[in-house]
Image (cartoon, rainbow, N blue to C red):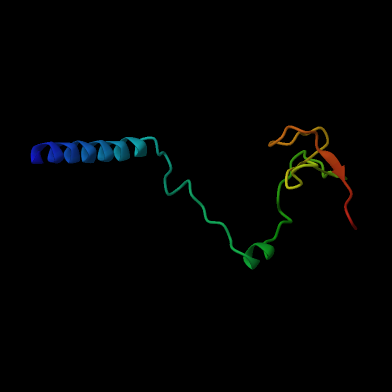
Amino acid sequence: MKKTILTIAFVATVLFSSSLVLSSCGNTSSSEDTHEHMEGDQHGDMDHSNMNHGDMEMADATYACPMHPEITGVKGDKCSICNMDLEEVETEE
């Protein structure tokens, strides 16, 4: 009886350990790939004047999903949650 319990415990330990090792094999991140984000008020102090917007035009109107207002985009986009067309949102100026 004790041999059976020890065998089961040993097999479970080996399986758990091998699953941890195998799951970490696909991790390709390195310390060079990571970066830190600024917290709170620090981000508001950043200078955005040198940002490169390329050929992107600034949109005159804002579009949002009627069911999920946190999903925004440009004219013709669809909601990534419910696939509804985004509708123009009136902005207060």
Which quadrant is the N terminus positioned in? top left
In which quadrant of the rendered view does residue 62 lie?
top right
Total labels: the figure holds 0
In which quadrant of the rendered view does residue 45 lie?
bottom right
Q: Is residue 27 left or right of residue 37?
A: left
Q: Residue furthest front?
A: 1
In front here: 3 or 67? 3
Q: Is residue 57 left or right of residue 40?
A: right
Q: Is residue 26 left or right of residue 35?
A: left
In front here: 13 or 73? 13
Say if 15 sits above or below 41 in the image.
above
Could you say where residue 54 lies in the image, as x and y percent from the top left? 74, 41
Residue positioned 65% across, 62% down in the render: 43
Could you say where residue 58 lies in the image, as x and y percent from the top left? 82, 45
Q: Is residue 87 left or right of residue 49?
A: right
In which quadrant of the rendered view does residue 82 lie?
top right
Which quadrant is the C terminus positioned in? bottom right
Residue positioned 42% across, 49% down in the render: 31
Could you say where residue 8 lies in the image, as x and y percent from the top left? 18, 37
Could you say where residue 40 lies in the image, as x and y percent from the top left? 62, 65
Residue positioned 51% across, 52% down in the render: 35
In front here: 33 or 63? 63
